[in-house]
């Protein structure tokens, strides 16, 4: 996959952004690769996924503005849905859309050198999904990050609930794997049920998130075999044989 590596540690699937020379800035191909990897994870026997990046310089500098991605494809619960736990393991800079990726994971751990920075007000562009941050950390802190573009360092990120724990630099991934291996021994139906209740019934969905989800539903219809069959039947003046796929 393009600049995305995948490996397993026992029951834990690790999906890592792997474009260190560009700070793991997410291209169109990378967003699609993360989405494909996570959809495959959901259908696999693996119990927990960790989203991370290689090295300790950066988790990601966000979307690559020279090759703008459909970033929503890489975002948990938006580009893909799974009842299995998803953990973000963050080292170094976590910038722009990468914060959205991290905040939408179920759990997050960061190294002591991690820094969270949302600069889109300085750039003049936003997809709007970052607004969901205000439902996940204190409102005023979220607004500070979005409107003042203030950098939040690791310890403060933990104190406001953006991450669960700060560990020594370089240990975020090993910690996330240990959490995943621990959860792999728990009842999958209970973990999945609790996660689904939180995602579907507790946490609000912002307009950008709803728009992305709606676009996926419509794309599924537009790309379906049934649509091709319907068009073919119309042209051939016959009754269509729909298969529901």
Image: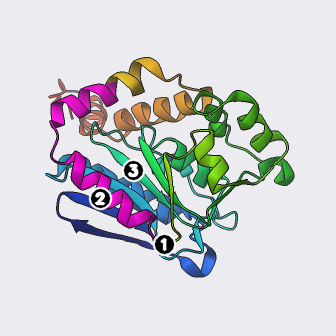
Q: Magenta segment, which residues?
A: 170-196
* Residue 191 is inside the magenta segment: yes
Residue 163, x across and y down, in percent: 53, 47
Q: Which residue is mark 3?
A: 87
Q: Secondary structure at mark 1?
A: loop
Q: Which residue is mark 1?
A: 170
Colour treatment of the image: rainbow
**Which residue is drawn at the image coordinates 62% and 76% (left, top)?**
22
* Residue 38 is inside the magenta segment: no
Q: Is residue 22 left or right of residue 79?
A: right
Residue 93, x across and y down, in percent: 64, 64
- Quadrant of residue 116 in the image? bottom right
In the image, which is nearer the foreground, mark 2 or mark 3? 2
Q: Is residue 41 visible?
A: no
Quadrant location, the N terminus: bottom left
Callout 2–callout 3 Cβ contact below 8 Å: no
Q: Secondary structure at mark 2?
A: helix
**Which residue is drawn at the image coordinates 63% and 65% (left, top)?**
67
Residue 175, x across and y down, in percent: 37, 60
- The chief SS type of the magenta part is helix
Disc 2/disc 1 C-alpha distance (Å): 14 Å
The front one of 192 and 31 is 192
Circle 1 residues within 10 Å: few <14, some 14–19, many ≥20? some
- Quadrant of residue 206 in the image? top right
| Earlier-in-chain disc, 2 versus 3 | 3
Q: Which residue is mark 2?
A: 178
Circle 2 residues within 10 Å: few <14, some 14–19, many ≥20? some
């Amino acid at each position: 996959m393009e600049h995305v590596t995948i490996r397993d540690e026992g029951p834990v699937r690790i999906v890592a952004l792997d474009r260190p020379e560009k700070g793991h800035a997410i291209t169109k191909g990378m967003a699609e690769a993360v989405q494909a990897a996570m959809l495959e994870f959901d259908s696999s026997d693996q119990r927990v996924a960790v989203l991370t990046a290689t090295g300790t310089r950066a988790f990601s500098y966000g979307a690559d503005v020279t090759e703008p991605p459909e970033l929503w494809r890489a975002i948990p619960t938006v580009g893909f849905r799974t009842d299995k736990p998803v953990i973000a393991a963050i080292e170094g800079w976590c910038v722009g859309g990468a914060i959205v990726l991290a905040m939408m994971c179920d759990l997050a751990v960061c190294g002591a050198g991690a820094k969270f920075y949302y600069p889109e007000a300085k750039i003049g562009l936003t997809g709007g999904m970052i607004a969901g941050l205000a439902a996940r950390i204190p409102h005023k802190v979220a607004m500070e990050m979005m409107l003042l573009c203030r950098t939040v360092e690791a310890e403060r990120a933990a104190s406001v609930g953006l991450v669960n724990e700060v560990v020594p630099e370089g240990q975020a991934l090993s910690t996330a794997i240990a959490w995943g291996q621990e959860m792999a021994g728990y009842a999958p139906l209970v973990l999945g049920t609790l996660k689904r209740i939180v995602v579907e019934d507790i946490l609000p969905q912002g307009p950008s998130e709803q728009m992305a989800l709606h676009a996926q539903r419509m794309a599924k219809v537009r790309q379906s075999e049934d649509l091709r069959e319907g068009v073919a039947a119309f042209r051939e003046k016959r009754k269509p044989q729909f298969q529901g796929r």
